[in-house]
Amino acid sequence: MFTGIIEGTGRLLEKKSVGGGLGFRLEADFDLSDPMEGESIAVNGICLTAYNIDNRKFSVDVSPESVSRTTLSYLSIGDPVNMERALRLSDRLGGHIVSGHVDCKAKVTEIENVGDYTLFTFVLQEKLGRYVIEKGSITIDGISLTVNLCEQEKFSVSIIPHTLQTSTLGRLRKGDEVNIEVDLIGKYVEKMLLADSDAGKGQGSKINPGFLAEHGFY
């Protein structure tokens, strides 16, 4: 698990095809203190297994599923990426709960400067729009962000100068694609709410709109 508060950026050193997927060699711009072979590191929001760790350099394999669902295949040698090591139970949860399992890609449709801030608008798959709510959390290329406005197929976020300078978001241009992970909790709540309508499969969930309203959640 991750928080969406990236530790820094890194760059792609090597890229090769591996069994229908990809193999990367990456270098972080921060120290990998106490690295453990096989630990999880989020690269542009995708949870990957690090091995052959040597100081700040490490290798990862990208499965065919991750290649098809994310922007990792678009990377070229030397390109920067956002990086975050896995959450420890003693860490502050400065962002929100992020799994590192990307749902889809979204395209930048508008970039607008508003004072010192930059407003980005993205369009994403309609079926995922229901998980994006105003003032809710969303993960874009591994970064936890707050949704400003949203409609069924598009949403916008406001980026502060610090985030633009310390992440890959400052390189985005209109038409570029990013990795999106919607709020994990929303998907679980939806599944539990729909459980009662799944006839013939157990007693169903006791969590429904009435239950949520009674307890102040709906």
Image (cartoon, grey):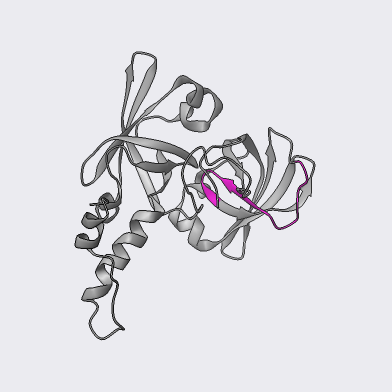
Q: Is residue 27 left or right of residue 42?
A: right
Above or below 145: residue 190: below
Residue 167 rendering spot, x and y as whole percentages: 53, 30
**Prevalent SS, magenta region:** loop
For the view shown, which residue lies furthest in the right direction? Answer: 54
**Span highlighted in magenta in the image:** 33-46
Instruction: State the residue at coordinates (31%, 37%).
Output: 135
Quadrant in which residue 195 is drawn: bottom left
Along the line of sight, which residue is nearer the eye, 24 or 50? 50
Instruction: State the residue at coordinates (35%, 31%).
Output: 174
Residue 72 rendering spot, x and y as whole percentages: 52, 48
Residue 33 rendering spot, x and y as whole percentages: 76, 41
Residue 34 included in the magenta stretch of the image: yes
Above or below 20: residue 115: above
Residue 85 rendering spot, x and y as whole percentages: 63, 45
Above or below 24: residue 211: below
Along the line of sight, which residue is nearer the eye, 213 or 110? 213
Instruction: State the residue at coordinates (43%, 43%).
Output: 139
Residue 61 included in the magenta stretch of the image: no
Instruction: State the residue at coordinates (60%, 54%).
Output: 48
For the view shown, which residue lies furthest in the bottom direction? Answer: 200
